[in-house]
Amino acid sequence: MRAHNFCAGPAALPVAVLERAQTELLNWEGAGASVMELSHRSPEFVGIAERAEAALRRLMNISDDYAVLFQQGGASQQFASVPLNLSSPGDVVDQVVTGQWSKKALAEGRRLTQVNVASSSESSNFSTIEPEANWSRTNNAAYLHYCPNETIGGLEFSFVPESNSPLVADMSSTILSRPVDVSQFGVIYAGAQKNIGPAGLCIVIVEKELLGRARADIPAMLNWQTAADNDSMYNTPPTFGIYLSGLVFEWIESLGGLDAMYERNKRKADTLYGLIDASDFYANPVDPQYRSLMNVPFTLADDALDKLFLSRAEEAQLLNLKGHRSVGGMRASIYNAVEQSSVDALCEFMHRFEKENG
């Protein structure tokens, strides 16, 4: 029996995808070898990569004006790739800081370019987002970087920022959870290990007119133009990750696409937030208008009960509910592959634990 997995990443994968991969593991479509054993230059694997990209383009309605890149190094590598590809010495870039991941992007950005913090919600312990009208922007900024959903703090933008410069978004924990208008962005990047596939892959969606702006001394592996020119195969790509991601994209399509996925995710989030809000025993620290659809942090009325809650939860096969060390408390990540039945099981456990310990 599979447990209910609320891990923030690497996260749960769809059972249907895992079962299909299992049946194909030793002999992919009669090739006589596993996907992991196929040459990335072979017609078989090139076809796998092309199908994965085509499925993602359909899901997100990505036009031919954008390149889709399969990169390694996770989203954290893009913290360096973004300024190296989009800014020159002397440029100023704008960054919005709403949690731990955008703080890390800021720290890396400052090593490579001049950064203006257009807005920060650190003074509120990252529990809200400053009104956009109050942001302090730079004229002719090279780009504006933000993180639409902060995995650790469970803070999510309810709007897409306006920007006269290219808008760059770290969508690692929100991509594919709902429809997105890609045309509003210059760059979207996302680590795979939440809603896309296994760890080790990062998707970069970049407007083609932004390619070719990289600094002359940029490492080839970080240059988006190099990746685009070589169909993401400048080096050996993460082949198994691309294969599994393609299966995930097809799984989402089979369920009705991103509109249907959003309805599933909203129901799950409403179920869990509804329990928390109706209780004096549990609390969510985030401004309700900016609550995350994917990552739900919560605290207990008495934090002395935290260890007991977690141990009892594991006994009930409710895994990975411990909050990030920088925030404490609990966190349930309810990505696409987490079923409503898992959220229902968590809520039943939370009701029971409150009754026994409240």
Image (cartoon, helix red, strand yellow):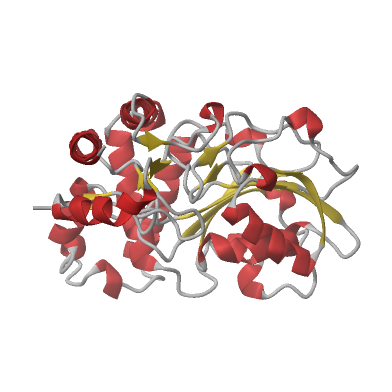
Position of 152 relative to 345 (above/below): below
Q: Quadrant of the C terminus?
A: top left
Residue depicted at x 34% and y 27%: 260
Residue depicted at x 17% and y 71%: 32
Position of 8 relative to 357 (above/below): below
208 relative to 182 in the view: left or right: right
228 relative to 152 in the view: left or right: right
306 relative to 236 in the view: left or right: left
**Residue 12 visible to the viewer:** yes
Quadrant in the rendering for residue 334? top left
Image position, residue 295 (x, y; %): 42, 43
Quadrant in the rendering for residue 131? top right
Residue furthest out toward the left: 1
Q: Nearer the viewer, residue 217 or 82?
A: 82
Image position, residue 120 (x, y; %): 71, 45
Position of 336 relative to 46 (above/below): above
Residue depicted at x 61% and y 72%: 221
Residue depicted at x 51% and y 47%: 153
Figure label count: 0
Q: Nearer the viewer, residue 323 or 295?
A: 323
25 relative to 81 in the view: left or right: left
Image position, residue 58 (x, y; %): 44, 37
Quadrant in the rendering for residue 251? top left
**Residue 321 visible to the viewer:** no
Image position, residue 29 (x, y; %): 19, 59
Q: Nearer the viewer, residue 168 or 30?
A: 168
